[in-house]
Image (cartoon, grey):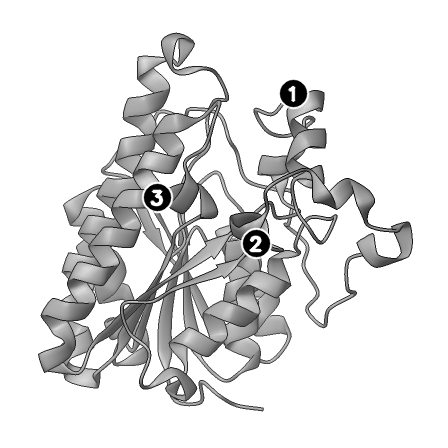
């Protein structure tokens, strides 16, 4: 199918994890994609892989929490592909897992910068172009933004902001033909939810998976499928919504995932060739807001 034929999309945080899956899913469905993210992340590799598969893509490297970089990213889309139809605010960070009294202030400030400033600046920069195409924004919320996140209370707070921010945009911008929605992932099989590559301890990882009624992590492609629907014209009457792709976490009351038989815990194979599901960094990184590269 070509549900996004003729569309142009920006996917922030597009170099790894869920972002890679969204970028490749959109390209597979006919969209031209700007794969945007930090220079350290494999955004260029993802863009190259899309092009090697017959799709259209360009990489944009820079710190999108900067107003100037956000505007430059939007201009890369318009300058390269002629328009902008879809903004996916997927970029975000998960730098620490501690009780609030021990939570590093540096980690909190880093999360505010990357989980809130980026969404604000990218959405604001994209609106003039989205008005021209009657486009839409889909942002990464989280079940943590709905329920809170013990051992990472600031993270849930940043995602609660994103939920309210998107709903506000949905109401405010509807008169221009712009839709705005959120996808709320639960535990997904990326670097963030593994003790070897993220901030979780072994016990936290075990509890996280067992707290999912379906008894497993979701895959990046399963989440990308929800983004695809919301970004497509099939969701033309959907705005201000939060679609949870969480295996039932938001309705769970216990560690019900531990009761799921092993054969039902297997992740679906999917269709996309994802090379960077466990790539990307979770630790705090210093960024020069002036660094930009378009390819």
Q: Which residue is mark 2?
A: 246
Residue drawn at x 52%, y 90% is 2
Residue 287 seen in the current view: no
Q: In the depicted view, which residue is nearer to us: 33 or 262?
A: 262
Q: Which image quarter is the N terminus in?
A: bottom right
Residue drawn at x 77%, y 64% is 268
Q: Which residue is mark 1?
A: 201
Left or right? Give the position of 92 relative to 135.
Answer: right
User: In this rendering, is residue 5 above or below 80?
Assistant: below
Mark count:
3
Residue 26: image x %, image y %? 50, 74
**Marks 2 and 3: CB-CB under 8 Å?**
no
Residue 78: image x %, image y %? 24, 73
Q: Secondary structure at mark 2?
A: loop
Could you give the CA–CA distance between mark 2 and mark 3, rounded to whole angstroms? 14 Å
Asked which quadrant contains residue 218, the reply is bottom right
**Disc sitting over residue 159 in the figure:** 3
Could you give the CA–CA distance between mark 1 and mark 2, rounded to whole angstroms? 20 Å
Q: In the depicted view, which residue is nearer to us: 239 or 72?
A: 239
Residue 6: image x %, image y %? 39, 89
Residue drawn at x 44%, y 85% is 4
């Amino acid at each position: 199918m070509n549900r996004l034929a003729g569309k142009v999309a920006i996917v922030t945080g597009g170099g790894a994890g869920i972002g890679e899956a969204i970028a490749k899913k959109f390209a597979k469905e006919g969209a031209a994609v700007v794969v945007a993210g930090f220079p350290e992340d494999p955004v260029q590799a993802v863009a190259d892989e899309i092009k090697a598969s017959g799709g259209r893509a360009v990489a944009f490297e820079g710190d999108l929490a900067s107003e100037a970089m956000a505007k430059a990213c939007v201009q890369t889309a318009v300058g390269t592909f002629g328009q902008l139809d879809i903004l996916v605010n997927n970029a975000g960070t998960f730098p620490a897992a501690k009780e609030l009294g021990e939570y590093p202030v540096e980690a909190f400030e880093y999360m505010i910068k990357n989980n809130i400033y980026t969404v604000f600046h990218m959405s604001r920069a994209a609106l003039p172009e989205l008005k021209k195409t009657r486009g839409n924004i889909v942002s990464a919320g989280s079940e943590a933004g709905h329920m809170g996140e013990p051992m990472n209370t600031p993270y849930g707070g940043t995602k609660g902001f994103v939920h309210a921010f998107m709903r506000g945009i949905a109401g405010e911008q509807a008169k221009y033909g712009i839709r705005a929605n959120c996808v709320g992932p639960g535990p997904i099989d990326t670097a963030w939810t593994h003790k070897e590559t993220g901030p979780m301890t072994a016990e936290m990882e075990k509890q996280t998976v067992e707290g999912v009624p379906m008894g497993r992590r979701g895959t990046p492609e399963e989440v990308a499928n929800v983004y695809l629907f919301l970004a497509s014209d099939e969701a033309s009457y959907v705005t201000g919504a939060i679609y949870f792709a969480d295996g039932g976490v938001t309705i769970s009351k216990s560690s019900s995932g531990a009761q799921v038989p092993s054969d039902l815990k297997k992740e679906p194979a999917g269709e996309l060739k994802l090379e960077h599901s466990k790539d990307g960094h979770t630790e705090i990184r210093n960024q020069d807001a002036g660094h930009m590269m378009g390819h």
